[in-house]
Image (spheres, rainbow, N blue to C red):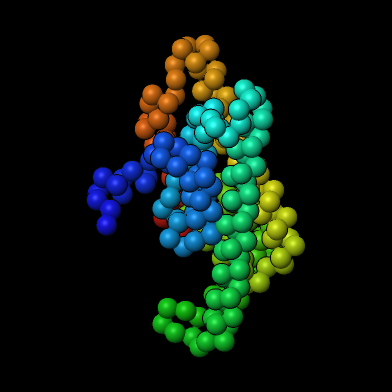
């Protein structure tokens, strides 16, 4: 059983860097995009923190002091996990969707919901899979719904890969180069105040989604 302290640790991206390194980060990215239970895990903030700690993450993995090589490997490892997570989510949704199509309407489920979702994904599925990478909660469920409504798999994979690469590159490089800039210009290391940085990232990525849902 986790204590309260352990649970709060799971919400702090720097904990994953300190306790599991790149392998744990890869698992978290996979779980957040491929498993229902992963929706609460840090995504954007974890990638940002991975950029801040990029040198530490690759200690013992790449013996050569090559910044570009280290960043490239981090981006490829995380992107691979994210793409694989979406594939698993799609597969899970496709398997579960068959039962939904065969089942009857209930109080909590109507077949028209599936039909509406399919029409939406037929029209906006590509953009949804791509943009969902940047939106907490949505990136967990978007591939599952895509599988449920049987979105074209080739189109799904194209935007799965491009979306994941864009998300990973933008977040990791922002963390790395912003931290390097602040250290060089102001002798300020982001790693000393990551709590505030992470909070800002969470609020920035979550508030627009919550606002839209409330308006609906």
Residue visible at 49% across and 55% down in the picture = 31
Q: Nearer the viewer, residue 112 or 53?
A: 53
Q: Quadrant of residue 98?
A: bottom right
Q: Nearer the viewer, residue 34 or 178?
A: 34
Image location of residue 132, percent across then percent down = 57, 52
Q: Nearer the viewer, residue 205 or 19?
A: 19
- Kindly tell me whether residue 42 is visible in this rendering: yes
Image location of residue 2, percent across then percent down = 28, 53
Q: Is residue 54 left or right of residue 152?
A: left
Count the marks: 0
Q: Is residue 8 above or below residue 214?
A: above
Residue visible at 26% across and 45% down in the picture = 5
Q: Identify the residue at the far right of this view.
A: 154
Image location of residue 136, percent across then percent down = 48, 50
Residue visible at 56% across and 69% down in the picture = 92
- Kindly tell me whether residue 116 is visible in this rendering: no
Q: Quadrant of residue 14?
A: top left
User: Quarter of the image containing the N terminus?
Assistant: bottom left
Q: Is residue 179 above or below residue 136?
A: above
Q: Nearer the viewer, residue 130 or 2?
A: 2
Image location of residue 125, percent across then percent down = 66, 61
């Amino acid at each position: 059983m986790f204590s309260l302290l352990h649970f709060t640790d799971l919400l702090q991206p720097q904990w994953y860097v300190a306790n599991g390194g790149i392998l744990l980060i890869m698992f978290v990215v996979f779980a957040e995009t491929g498993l229902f239970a992963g929706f609460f895990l840090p995504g954007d903030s974890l990638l940002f923190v991975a950029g801040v700690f990029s040198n530490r993450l690759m200690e013992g993995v790449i013996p050569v002091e090559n910044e570009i090589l280290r960043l490239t490997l981090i981006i490829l490892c995380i992107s691979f996990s994210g793409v694989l997570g979406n594939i698993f989510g799609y597969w899970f949704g496709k398997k579960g969707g068959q039962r939904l199509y065969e089942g009857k309407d209930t109080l909590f489920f109507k077949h028209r919901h599936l039909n509406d979702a399919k029409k939406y994904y037929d029209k906006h599925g590509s953009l949804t899979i791509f943009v969902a990478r940047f939106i907490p909660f949505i990136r967990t469920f978007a591939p599952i719904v895509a599988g449920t409504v049987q979105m074209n798999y080739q189109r799904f994979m194209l935007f799965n890969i491009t979306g994941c690469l864009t998300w990973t590159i933008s977040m990791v490089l922002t963390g790395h180069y912003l931290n390097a800039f602040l250290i060089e210009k102001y002798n300020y290391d982001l790693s000393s105040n990551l709590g505030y940085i992470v909070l800002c990232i969470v609020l920035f990525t979550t508030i627009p989604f919550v606002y839209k849902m409330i308006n609906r």
